[in-house]
Amino acid sequence: MSLNGCVSVISIDTGKILDLEVMTQYCKMCEMNIKCDHECSNYKGSSGNMESVGAFRIFERSVMKRELQYTEYYGDGDSKAFLKVKDIYGEDTVTKLECIGHVQKRVGSRLRKFFKKKGLGGKGKLTDKFIDKLQNYYGIAIRSNAGSIEKMQSAVIAAFFHCCSINRNLMHGQCPHGKDSWCRYKRSLSDKR
């Protein structure tokens, strides 16, 4: 359990912090039983809800204090904070951007959970090493094709077939061609030409 939390708004264009909300459930004065007028902690509630409250406070004051409306929320996949701010300026005025690293991690986590539940693990089947490999190629496919859903989908399928390929059953038909390909097999073919 964390007693402190920090939520920030960062400009995509400049990388500068536009606003910051630091929250704490801890008060040194109260801990030391000092009886005086002071503002105690600025947050009461569960640690898990701190991110949501911080994001809401920042978005709520954005128009009045900064004369800005934040249009995009960038957070991890399980963030409840987005639900607190998505309609803050009107219905669906804030869109959510996903962190590629979190999406990539979720792929690995879900595959591991699936193969343990279904008993698909073992030699010649899903292994942690294979899932790590697939997860890494998945991340490369997403990052390399962030501007196009079609290319991203194609690259994810290529990554899957690439990872399933073995010497006696080559499956590199979907992999990109050329000497700049992430696929070693396709790179070696272009070197031979």
Image (cartoon, rainbow, N blue to C red):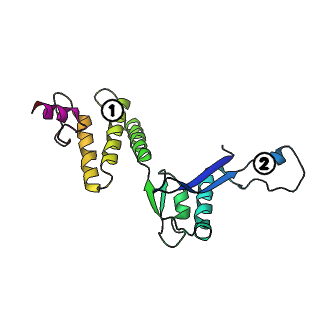
Question: In terms of depth relative to the viewer, which is nearer, 32 or 190?
Answer: 190
Tell me the amino acid under the disc marked 1. Phe
User: Neighbour class for label 1 at 10 Å: few (<14), some, many (≥20)?
Assistant: some
Magenta residues (range): 176-191
Q: Is residue 184 magenta?
A: yes
For marks 1 and 2, the one nearer the N-term is 2
Query: Does residue 70 show up?
Result: yes
Name the residue type under label 2: Cys
Question: What residue did someone put label 1 on?
Answer: 130
Residue furthest front as drawn: 14
Kindly identify which numbered label has been placed on residue 27.
2
Q: Position of residue 58 (x, y in %)?
A: 60, 61
Where residue 147 appears, x then y in whole percent? 31, 55
The number of numbered badges drawn on the structure is 2
Looking at the image, which residue sits at the far left? 193
- Residue at image position (80%, 45%) is 28
Apparent side of residue 160 relative to residue 67 in the rendered image (left or right): left
Asked where in the image residue 171 lies, by quadrant, the reply is top left
Residue at 14% across / 31% down in the picture?
191
